[in-house]
Image: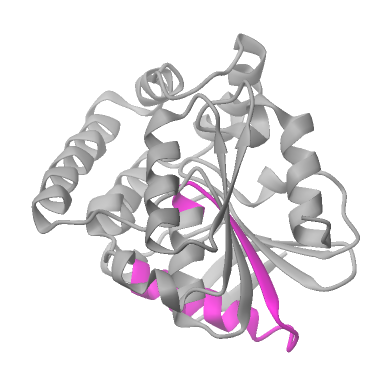
């Protein structure tokens, strides 16, 4: 279904009944990423984020982190019960930021994600990298970008997995993806490292082979000891795809209780 959030038309999938859980996909994803998640007795709410899927493509200035958070806060208005928010990669960065800003979020689950970069120097460097990637998308085209993206060493994906994801990636709009990098790439994200203690209950899921994001998760735990980390074996940056069975068991327990 399509709904209006602050003047922007969003694609939002609603599925199931029960307490509300907001699911936020990663870069090059869309609302339908929940199709790969286990069926649970909850109310799934899954939007395609700004510049993704069938959601409208507004300007770069209308697609920044602060604008995305304001939109999602309006989406939380649709249910007056406390929310759990689950976010993967880009969606995880947004989920952590939303949890820090909106007290209606009582539990946040970040998958292969980060609370941002610590220093302004790191953010400047990352903005430069994101700008270069955005330029590559616009000049070389979506097919070349997807080929480059799916062959990054952070994945542990079989050719079958790549094929299953390729259709969604190729369905994106190249200018919109480029603008997403310019608006809400990691280098443009305000750091949350100083706000970790303001987060509600926080759980992190990482692939055992994703060394970079394992280190980030452990650093977060060092800053706030009650953050719990769950490693998915035989998985890299996309544990929900690369080891769906083990991931499904963990996410079910985290959302429904038992851990």
Rendered residue at 38%/64% (across/down): 58
Q: Is residue 129 left or right of residue 107?
A: left
The quarter holding residue 10 reads bottom right
18, 32: nearer the viewer: 18
Q: Is residue 210 above or below residue 6?
A: above
> Which residue, as the protein is rendered here, is positioned at the far top?
159
Residue 123 in the image: state x and y as whole percent.
Answer: 17, 52
174 left or right of 208 in image:
left
Q: Nearer the viewer, residue 257 or 174?
A: 257
Residue 250 visible within the image: yes
Looking at the picture, how far across and down is residue 72, in whole percent?
Answer: 54, 74
Front-most of 125 and 220? 220
**Quarter of image, res 201:** bottom right
What residue is at 69 percent from the left and 27 percent from the top? 243
Look at the image and tell me in which quarter the C terminus lies: bottom right
State whether residue 7 is above or below residue 36.
below
**120 relative position to 147: left or right:** left
Q: Where in the figure is residue 16, as x and y percent of width and height?
A: 88, 62
Q: Which quadrant is home to the N terminus?
A: bottom right
- Residue 44 location in percent, x, y? 77, 62
Magenta segment? 65-91
Dividing the picture into quadrants, the one containing residue 193 is bottom left
Is 67 colored magenta in this rendering? yes
Q: Is residue 14 magenta?
A: no
């Amino acid at each position: 279904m399509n709904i209006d959030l602050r003047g922007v038309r969003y694609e939002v999938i609603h599925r199931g009944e029960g307490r509300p859980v907001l699911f936020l996909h990663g870069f090059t994803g869309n609302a339908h990423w929940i199709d790969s998640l286990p069926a649970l007795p909850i109310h799934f709410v899954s939007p395609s984020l700004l510049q993704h899927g069938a959601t409208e493509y507004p300007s770069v200035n209308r697609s920044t982190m602060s604008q995305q958070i304001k939109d999602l806060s309006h989406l939380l208005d649709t249910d007056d019960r406390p929310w759990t928010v689950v976010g993967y990669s880009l969606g995880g960065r947004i989920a952590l930021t939303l949890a820090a800003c909106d007290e209606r979020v009582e539990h946040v689950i970040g998958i292969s994600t980060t609370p941002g970069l610590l220093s302004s120097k790191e953010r400047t460097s990352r903005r430069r990298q994101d700008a270069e990637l955005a330029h590559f998308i616009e000049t070389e085209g979506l097919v070349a970008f997807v080929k480059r993206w799916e062959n990054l060493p952070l994945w542990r994906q079989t050719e079958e997995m790549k094929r299953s994801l390729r259709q969604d990636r190729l369905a994106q709009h190249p200018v919109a993806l480029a603008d997403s990098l310019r608006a809400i790439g990691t280098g443009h994200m305000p750091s949350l490292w100083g706000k970790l203690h303001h987060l509600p209950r926080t759980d992190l899921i990482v692939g055992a082979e994703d060394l970079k994001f394992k280190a980030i998760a452990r650093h977060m735990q060092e800053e706030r000891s009650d953050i719990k980390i769950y490693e998915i074996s035989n998985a890299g940056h996309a544990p929900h795809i690369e080891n769906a069975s083990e991931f499904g068991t963990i996410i079910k327990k985290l959302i429904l209780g038992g851990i």
